[in-house]
Amino acid sequence: MRLLLVEDDQDLADWLTQSLIGCGFQVDWAEDGRSAESRIAAEDYDLILLDLGLPLMTGAELLARLKAGGNDTPLLVMTARDSLAQRVALLRDGADDFMGKPFAIEELEVRIHALIRRSHGRARGVYACGPLSFDHAAQRFTLLGDALLLSPREHAVLRLLIQKPGDPLSKQQIIDRLVSMESDMNPEAVEVIVHRLRKRLAHAPVQIVTLRGIGYLLEHDEGTA
Amino acid sequence: MTRRDTAAPGRPLWRTLALWMLPTLLFLMVAGLMLSVKTLREVADSAYDRSLRGAIRAIDLRISTESGGLGVELPYPLFESFQATAEGEVLFRVSTDDGLVQIGDALLPAPPPLTVGQVVFYDAVYFNRPIRVGAYMRPLDPPLYGAEGQNLIIEIAETTESREAFLRTVISRTMMRDLAALLAAALLLAVGVHAGLRPLRALRDRLDHRASDDLRQLDPAGLPREVQPLVRSVNRLVDRHRIQGEAQRRYIEDASHQLKTPLAVLRAQIDRGLQLEDPAALHAVLRAMREITDRSSRLTSQLLALALARNSALWSSSAAEEVDVSALLDGVVRLHLASARKRRIVLEVEVAPDVTTVHATEALLFEAVSNILQNAITASPAKGVIALSARRAGGQTVIAVRDDGPGLSDELLRRLDQGQRFNLPRTRRAAPASTGLGLAIVQEIMGAMGGTLVLANRPEGGLTASLNLPNRHAELKAD
């Protein structure tokens, strides 16, 4: 897997590259925003590791330009400026993930793999949460390798949940997004659908968690259950 | 200090006063002058006209029709004395209203319509010279040549140079007097302003000659009463700076201590590592170093957050706005959801229906809520429940985070209550994620927003951390 590391501090870039190569990645290094932009235009990367404080063009500018240009290479931002408000703003501006410097290389590796897996799945139109996957082209759910048969409403709700892994959806958000197909959707109906979905997923390490006041979250039980 | 140099100075005080006063004075003077010119002209006219009337009477008495025609015996002595006082030329004409007979200056302009028995005065022009004419008409009895209803008109005119000259003299004197008064007023104004501002200049010199670190209070004695509030304001400002400066100094001392400790540990670990030959032991040292690095990086970012919170508290009161509580809590929860779910902790949000917005600086409030939620997640057992709630309570909005962790020891609660912070868990190895600064940051932020942080153990176990925010904090705490 090929990564582009955009980082102006030579020491950090050097050590980070060595560690990432040690993890089995192929790493290119760009020292500033402009050369990063031209490299991204010329080559095909699986992921971009972006530092924010760059010379010539700041990381935030580069991020904005890439997103404006329709580039959908997953982008992981590394920064020493880790104020929370900024973190929220970065994610909103299109960064896929965020790590505050300094960070543990193991965690970086895990996040890189997750982002790349998600982006490859999305490119093929496949969304996954543990053993549950959804093929967008075929409009089909697969659980533990078998096709999962669902009613149209169950299908629609589960599709919404699996397309945004790790991001809870409130009942109202679900209703808003389904309004085009279901005119008589109400919060009680959503509860019933979720209840039925839970039954269908009962024996799989995938569950729909209720976070009161926040929403529903589709989650993979990684052997902890 | 540099701002004063770049800002354009305002209008000088004397000019402001002059702009208010002088136009008014000027207007009053011009109006007064116009009024006196009118009055003077009337007075002069009535005086001069009286002598014209006298001349008309004198001529009237000397008119005879006994010869069958019209005869006038001119009162030469009268004319002479009259001419002498008028300092000009005297003209006369005696005529009948049918124009049959004219004696005297036939070229005098025709009179306006006259009333029998009345003397009328008017201005006219005679060979390009302004003249004042008095005209009188009376029935001629008996009429000439058998004509009927014939009237006699007597006109006497004098050139008006003398009365104009008189008027000019009087008016120019009035104007001179008014101008002198105006100049005196302007001068008094300038001198008064200069004298009135002398205490202020003295004050400025006192301030300018101060050493840059001299933050003593100014003595307002001897300054005009109007300036005293300004001096008191300056004193309060100076005092605030002094307190802030001291807090800053303490903060830097504390921070450098906190930052140097892990560096010293790292240094010791490296030295130890270099002594080691056994790869396994070396590995252990490296792992220990990694832990120290993690801790110091958390410490750094929290020190930074604390500094930012203080800074915002000091400088950005204007950033306060109406913050949507539900959206804020939702944002905080989403930020921490992943780390909470790693340990299967359930997060819940409950916002009372009467809570809509709070007046706060959004980034700071976010930071505060985020910090107490982070603490709760760290303290919570796996699969525990953490509830965030917002409600109104007696003029306050209370944002609370409740966990079912072990809570805080009484000792710790007491120390937090007394405002001790910073050096809390320096030796607490049990919770490596804690730098002890999280709550200090929250306290700092709450202080800036006029709110309070209340920590309380729950009887059923766990801790409730509440942020009590005034519904509207008018201003940053000034002192």
Image (cartoon, coloured by chain):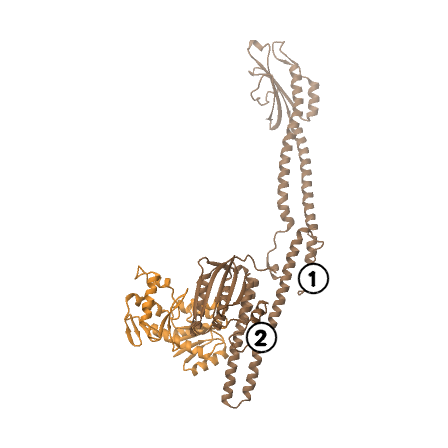
Quadrant occupied by the N terminus of chain B:
bottom right
Q: Residues within 10 Å of mark 2 (few under 14, many from 20)?
A: some
Per the model, the C-alpha gap separating discs 1 and 2 is: 39 Å
Q: Nearer the viewer, residue B234 or A217?
A: A217
Quadrant of the rendered structure where residue B104 is? top right
Q: Residues within 10 Å of mark 1 (few under 14, many from 20)?
A: few
Q: Which chain is orange?
A: A
Vertical placement of residue A2 versus B21, above or below: below
Disc nearest the viewer among 1 and 2: 2
Label 1 is found on which chain of the structure? B
Q: Are marks 1 and 2 in contact (CB under 8 Å)?
A: no
User: From this viewpoint, which residue is outermost toward the bottom?
Assistant: B277
Q: Residue at x 50, y 83 (%)?
A: B287
Label 2 is found on which chain of the structure? B
Vertical placement of residue B54 versus B298, above or below: above
Residue labelled with disc 1? B209
Q: Which chain is brown?
A: B
Answer left or right for A205 relative to B401.
Answer: left
* Residue B258, numbered label: 2
Tell me the SS state at disc 2.
helix
Quadrant occupied by the C terminus of chain B:
bottom right
Q: Nearer the viewer, residue A126 or B165?
A: A126
User: From this viewpoint, which residue is outermost toward the right?
Assistant: B222
Residue B211 drawn at (x, y percent): 68, 64
